Amino acid sequence: MSTKTDTDGDTDTGESASDPLDALDVEGHPDYSRAERETTVCMPGDSDRFTISSFRPSIVRRLLRHPEFRVTHITTYDDDSDTTQARDELDDVGDETVCGATGTLPVGALFIKPSPRKSTQQGKVIGKQRE
């Protein structure tokens, strides 16, 4: 189990040491301020899935680990060439740093609590999967 603290101060605990997603370098884009590393949710009225897009590393990690998350595109940053790319699939990511993810989740995965949670870390809005 690994713990990562991203550049926004959120912590994320990896699911397992053998998780292939742990090999991905997921960090905030160096040109984006903390305010620009936003997360958006869009829920069309006639769909059974909602779209979520995030540039916050702790949320990106949790989205990529969610078994129901369907990737629409992955945003990567290549430090060597100073370029940002949109990738269609996670398998298209090479040595670049993942700095954003967009995809869909079932509407049933979203629940807004009637009272605030104790943690103010944004990464905690996506719960860990239970076995």
Image (cartoon, rainbow, N blue to C red):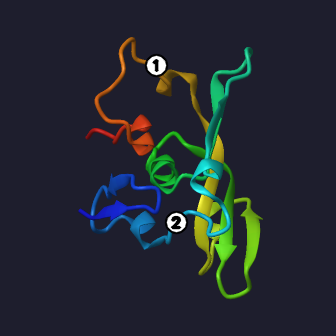
Q: Is residue 63 left or right of residue 54?
A: left
**Is 25 on the left or on the right of 52, as rendered?**
left
Q: What amino acid is at disc 1?
A: Ile
Q: Nearer the viewer, residue 102 or 70?
A: 102
Quadrant of the rendered image containing residue 100: bottom right
**For the residue carrying disc 2, how many other residues have a C-alpha within 10 Å: few (<14), some (14-19), or many (20+)?**
many
**Looking at the image, is 26 positioned above or below residue 116?**
below
Number of residues whose C-alpha sits closer than 10 Å to that of mark 1, classed few (under 14), some (14–19) or many (20 or more): few
Which quarter of the rendered picture does the C terminus lie within? top left
Numbered circle sitting on residue 27: 2
**What residue is at 51 percent from the left and 39 percent from the top?**
68
Residue at 35% from the left image edge and 54% from the top image edge:
12
Q: CA distance from mark 1 to mark 2?
A: 27 Å
Of marks 1 and 2, which one's residue comes earlier in the chain? 2
Look at the numbered disc 2 and give the secondary structure of its residue: loop
- The tag on residue 74 is none
Residue located 58% across and 72% down the image: 97
Between 108 and 61, the one lying in front of the other is 61
Q: Position of residue 17 (x, y in %)?
A: 27, 67
Residue 101, given in percent of the width and then of the height, sits at 62, 52
Q: Residue at x 50, y 57 (%)?
A: 57
Question: In the rendering, which numbered label is found on residue 112?
Answer: 1
Q: Is residue 49 above or below residue 122?
A: above
Residue extending farthest to the top is 114
Label 2 sits on what residue type? Glu
The one of 91 and 123 positioned closer to us in this rendering: 123
Q: Residue 48, relative to residue 16: is it above or below?
A: above
Give coordinates of residue 123: x percent, y percent: 43, 45
Helix, strand or loop under label 1: loop
